[in-house]
């Protein structure tokens, strides 16, 4: 135990020495654009009597803000906390068309299924390690962040059957759905030094989560304030 504590103290002293030339913390705030997959891609059909056509997936561009605070342990390693909110007043929909023949003497029937997602509000709360490389005025960085994503999305769906005289169309009423799930962001960017304690940042992230399916992209830009440098 004594040797372990001595090793920890030595490691912390080394970090303190390495961090003398680095700012103690960096605060970022700016504009954010995100492209989210709000609806899952429509599935294809395997039955030989069925065909498929429709939108392969529902994506929507969202605008908002992004902020983060990174505490530097040395010149190249820090722990970052990231917050963001992205919003849109628009909607996106996917439509799948399934054509079936119930029996050999029956007329073909077409089933049209439509899903709609609108007015999304998505917030991310993430934390993780960040690695940077000081190179003059430009300082590139990369990070791996994990946390939670909360989404509020208004959804509705409808089903219409064409070619069936005894069938009726159905629909699910429009409803606002909120969900919170585990989220991951993998990405990075670069800071361009404007002054000793001020820089301009451009970064992009690939996000994945359990709440609104997969394959999201977020791009952010804004100012970085370097504290304690």
Image: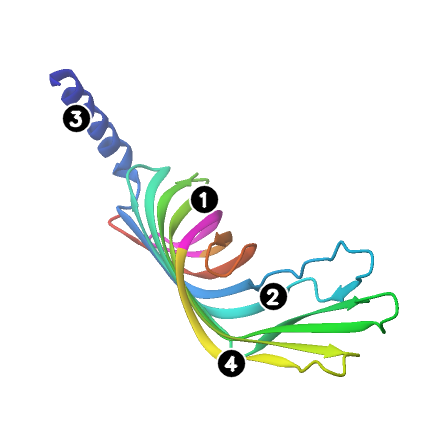
- Circle nearer the N terminus (3, 4): 3
- In terms of sequence position, does the residue under pointer 3 or pointer 1 come before the other? 3
Query: Which callout, 3 or 2, points at the residue further toward the start of the chain?
Result: 3
Q: CA distance from mark 2 to mark 1?
A: 28 Å
Q: CA distance from mark 4 to mark 2?
A: 19 Å
Q: CA distance from mark 1 to mark 4?
A: 43 Å
- Distance from the alpha carbon under mark 3 to that under mark 1: 28 Å
User: Residue at the location (73% across, 72% down)?
Assistant: 111
Q: Quadrant of residue 13?
A: top left
Q: Secondary structure at mark 3?
A: helix
- Give the residues drawn in magenta, as a range: 182-200
Residue of label 2: 59
Q: Which residue matches tag 3?
A: 9
Tag 2 and tag 1, C-beta contact below 8 Å: no
Label 4 vs 2, first from the N-terminus = 2
Instruction: Mark 1: give few (<14), some (14-19) or many (20+) Cα within 10 Å.
Output: some
Give the number of the mark in front: 2 or 1.
Answer: 2
Q: Is residue 1 above or below residue 204?
A: above
Instruction: Find residue 141 and name its label.
Output: 1
Number of disc labels:
4
Image x and y of residue 46, in percent: 76, 54
Q: Which residue is mark 4?
A: 174
- Where does residue 69 sit, x and y in percent of width and height? 31, 54
Mark 2 is surrounded, within 10 Å at the Cα level, by few (under 14), some (14 to 19) or many (20 or more) other residues, namely many
Q: Which of marks 4 and 1 precedes in the sequence?
A: 1
Between disc 2 and disc 1, whose residue precedes? 2
Q: Quadrant of the N terminus?
A: top left
> In what element is the residue under mark 4?
strand
């Amino acid at each position: 135990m004594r040797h372990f504590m001595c090793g920890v103290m030595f490691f912390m002293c080394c970090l303190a020495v390495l961090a003398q030339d680095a700012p103690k913390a960096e605060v970022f705030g700016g504009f954010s654009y995100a492209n989210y997959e709000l609806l899952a891609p429509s599935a294809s059909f395997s039955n030989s009597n069925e065909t498929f056509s429709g939108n392969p997936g529902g994506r929507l561009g969202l605008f908002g803000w992004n902020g983060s605070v990174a505490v530097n342990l040395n010149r190249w390693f820090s722990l970052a906390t990231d917050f963001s909110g992205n919003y849109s007043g628009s909607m996106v929909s996917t439509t799948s068309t399934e054509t079936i023949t119930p029996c050999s003497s029956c007329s073909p029937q077409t089933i049209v299924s439509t899903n709609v997602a609108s007015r999304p509000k998505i917030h991310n709360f993430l934390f993780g390690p960040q690695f940077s490389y000081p190179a003059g005025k430009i300082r590139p960085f990369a990070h791996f962040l994990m946390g939670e994503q909360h989404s509020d999305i208004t959804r509705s769906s409808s089903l219409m059957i064409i070619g069936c005289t005894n069938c009726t169309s159905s629909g699910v009423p429009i409803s606002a759905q909120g969900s919170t799930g585990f989220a991951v962001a993998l990405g990075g960017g670069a800071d361009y030094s404007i002054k000793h304690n001020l820089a301009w940042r451009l970064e992009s992230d690939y996000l994945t989560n359990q709440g609104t399916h997969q394959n999201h992209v977020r791009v952010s830009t804004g100012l970085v304030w370097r504290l304690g440098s």
